[in-house]
Image: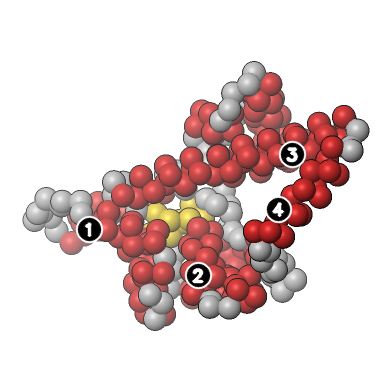
Amino acid sequence: MVKLTPEKQTEVDQIFSKIYAGLPPEAKAKIDQIKAEGAQEIRDLESEFEARIKQLEAGGCRLIPIAELVWGAAFAARRAEPLESRKDLASYESGRAFIRAIKAALLDGSLVAREQGSGIPISDRAWCLENDTLLSLPKMMPHDRLMVRTDEVRAWLEKMGIAIDALPLVQLAQEGITSIPRAPTKAKPEELAGEQAEIDRKETGPARTLKPEESPEERGERLRKRVEEKKAAGVKAYLKEVAEEEKVSISTLKQIVTKARKRRDKQ
């Protein structure tokens, strides 16, 4: 990646400004729309990330999305690479290697994928066996509802020789967990195992089934309309609001809405 000097960047900005000024109104409107949507998406991602960090700091989250772990490893490799020209490559290669290590751990039982949130059940095995040879790093990512427990992934990372400091999410989550006071108990081992199973069930949450009268296609169309109504009404964080109403992540909501739009466009 070529890094421009401030003078060169100013020169490039002036060129683009002249090009923009000479465009017809409809082209300018399209560019403005893309810029606005991009800015909104960044705000949505920031809100989602801040909420996740607060949840981790409070010790209320004992699960971490596998995709976020991978991105954390990729960003850590980018920061550690001293050569600017190799930062993107280091991030890409490390992310791919981390994904393959996690897939191997899931297949041999070293890690257990736990599903969280609502929607159709998803298979971590299908993701593990997927041929990712020609896929980009974003395309290699698993569904954002596939998660791992922070204590389990910490033990796995230590066994792999990966520094916990390189992955802030794991460190934050672990600190939050250990800070939660636990009352002493004299329960029998089998009772403790039953209690732990119940805790795990509550953490992952049973996958919410769709209403009997609502098919996945109908749900997608309903959410598409809901998103577009809020957007048309001028709601700034329209995706965030609908995601909170449906109790899904913003990224999951985007996937559902995108599929609904593609179905609509084919009709």
Q: Is 144 rendered above or below residue 83?
A: above
x%, y% of residue 181? 15, 51
* Nearer the camera: disc 4 or disc 2: 4
- Seen from the viewer's position, the closer of residues 97 and 126 is 97
Q: Are discs 1 and 4 less than 8 Å apart at CB?
A: no
Comes first in the chain, label 4 or label 3: 4
Disc 1 from disc 4: Cα separation: 50 Å
Disc 4 from disc 2: Cα separation: 26 Å
Disc 2 from disc 3: Cα separation: 29 Å
The disc placed on residue 79 is 2
Amino acid type at mark 4:
Thr
Quarter of the figure with residue 87: bottom right
Comes first in the chain, label 1 or label 4: 4
Residue that carries the numbered disc 4 in the rendered image: 10
Is residue 105 something that shows in the picture?
yes
Residue that carries the numbered disc 3 in the rendered image: 34
Q: Are discs 4 and 2 less than 8 Å apart at CB?
A: no
Q: Crowding near pointer 4: few (<14 within 10 Å), some, many (20+)?
A: few
Residue that carries the numbered disc 1 in the rendered image: 178
Comes first in the chain, label 4 or label 2: 4
Disc 1 from disc 3: Cα separation: 44 Å
Amino acid type at mark 1:
Thr
Comes first in the chain, label 2 or label 1: 2
* Nearer the camera: disc 4 or disc 3: 4
Q: Is 155 rendered above or below residue 178?
A: below
At 77% from the left edge and 48% from the top edge, which residue is drawn? 14
Disc 2 from disc 1: Cα separation: 28 Å
Quarter of the figure with residue 226: top right
x%, y% of residue 225? 69, 25
Q: Crowding near pointer 1: few (<14 within 10 Å), some, many (20+)?
A: few
